[in-house]
Image (spheres, rainbow, N blue to C red):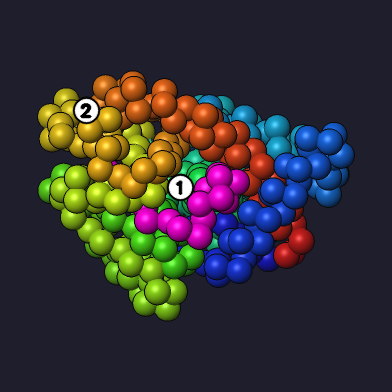
Amino acid sequence: MRHFLTLKDFSKEEILEIIDIGLEIKKNLVSKIYNQELKNQTLGMIFEKSSTRTRVSFEVGMFQLGGHALFLSNRDIHLGRGEPVKDTARVISSMCDMVMIRTFEHSKIEEFAAYSKVPVINGLTDSYHPVQLLADYMTLVEHGVEKNIVAAYVGDGNNMTHSWMILAAKLGFELRVATPSGYEVDAKILEEALAFAKESGAVIKIMNDPKEAIKGATVVTTDTWVSMGQEEEKEERLKVFKGFMVDDEMMSLAKDGAKFLHCLPAYRGYEVSESVFEKHSEIIFNEAENRLHAQKGLMVWLSRHR
Ligand code: CP
Ligand code: NVA
């Protein structure tokens, strides 16, 4: 049995296989042929943070695969009132066939997985957001640019940045990360990514100058400056991140025809300008929709590896 907690535990071939299954299912969905491979199976979804895309995509995805999904908010289940993670894991995994969790500390999902009898999927932790990267890469494949990725991530060194680093390191492309000083990526995760990069030939560069990162990039991406759980730091962050907005001037430094991705929700006038967002809205909303298709690929893959 395999869990999907970070991309670190997956080989390049496995990541591509998950995306291929997702793309195949997506193709069939258009012609209304439904893959019912998870018929009568149940996905428990524990949310300790807000969500639009993750909730809708997992719930709809499980339904389309013939199964059922349960939305479990920590406001409603006993986990939110102090029932231990390991007890919650043993109970829920005795009844569900798969569990998806969105939470704060990454160690919490690791503990849950250690006690779970069924595959556990990371739907975002403070440290990683791997399902988003499956959708992002699927989108780049659909746009035919996956062979030529020089990616620039501009903004906060957060869960999205960490997952971009691991994806680049596993698949072997170049990633430049520009964050303000003091908001760099986690040093340990960077070290792990660099170790994978050595094997794959990926190039990961860390810097503080967004322009240097974007220069000549074929893919530009960013994320909110204030992640869930950091609301109290908002005022300070908005000051520090000035100069990191991806606007038209920044995008003009990228390679002609460069793609812009955003995991959403997007805060216009902060990490991205309204103009850049709207110019790239087609690919951005394709990326959002691909959460559904990529995660269907993931759930099918996990169920085939039990
Ligand atoms: N991108 C993403 O994970 O969106 P939600 O927070 O809406 O799930
Ligand atoms: N970094 C953001 C991603 C939201 C999908 C957060 O953790 O809030």
Point 43% across, 56% down: residue: 149
The magenta stretch is 139-161
Q: Considering only order in the chain, which callout, 2 or 1, is on the residue closer to the N terminus? A: 1
Is label 1 in a helix, a strand or a loop? loop
Asked if residue 306 shows in the view, the reply is yes
Asked if residue 179 shows in the view, the reply is no
Q: Is residue 251 magenta?
A: no
Is label 2 in a helix, a strand or a loop? helix
Mark 1 vs ligand 2: CB under 8 Å?
Answer: yes
Q: In this view, does 278 lie to the left or right of 236?
A: right
- Expressed as whole percent of the image width and height from the top left, the position of residue 93 reads 68, 51
User: Any mark on residue 216, and which?
Assistant: none
Q: Does 138 appear above or below 167?
A: above
Using the image as rendered, state which of residue 259 and residue 265 is in the foreground. 259
Q: Distance of mark 1 from mark 2, alpha carbons? A: 21 Å
Which residue, given by chain and number where applicable, does mark 1 sit on?
Answer: 129
Residue 221 found in image quarter: top left
Which amino acid type is marked by label 2? Lys
Quadrant of the snapshot with the N terminus? bottom right
Q: Is residue 158 magenta?
A: yes
Point 85% across, 34% down: residue: 32
Quadrant of the snapshot with the C terminus? bottom right
- Expressed as whole percent of the image width and height from the top left, the position of residue 86 reads 54, 53
Point 63% across, 54% down: residue: 19
Badge 1: few (under 14), some or many (20 or more) residues near its Cα, within 10 Å?
Answer: many
Using the image as rendered, state which of residue 169 and residue 260 is in the foreground. 260
Using the image as rendered, state which of residue 190 and residue 120 is in the foreground. 190
- Expressed as whole percent of the image width and height from the top left, the position of residue 101 reads 54, 44
Point 61% across, 61% down: residue: 16
Q: Does 222 appear above or below 106?
A: above
Which residue, given by chain and number where applicable, does mark 2 sit on?
Answer: 234
Q: In this view, does 72 lie to the left or right of 220?
A: right
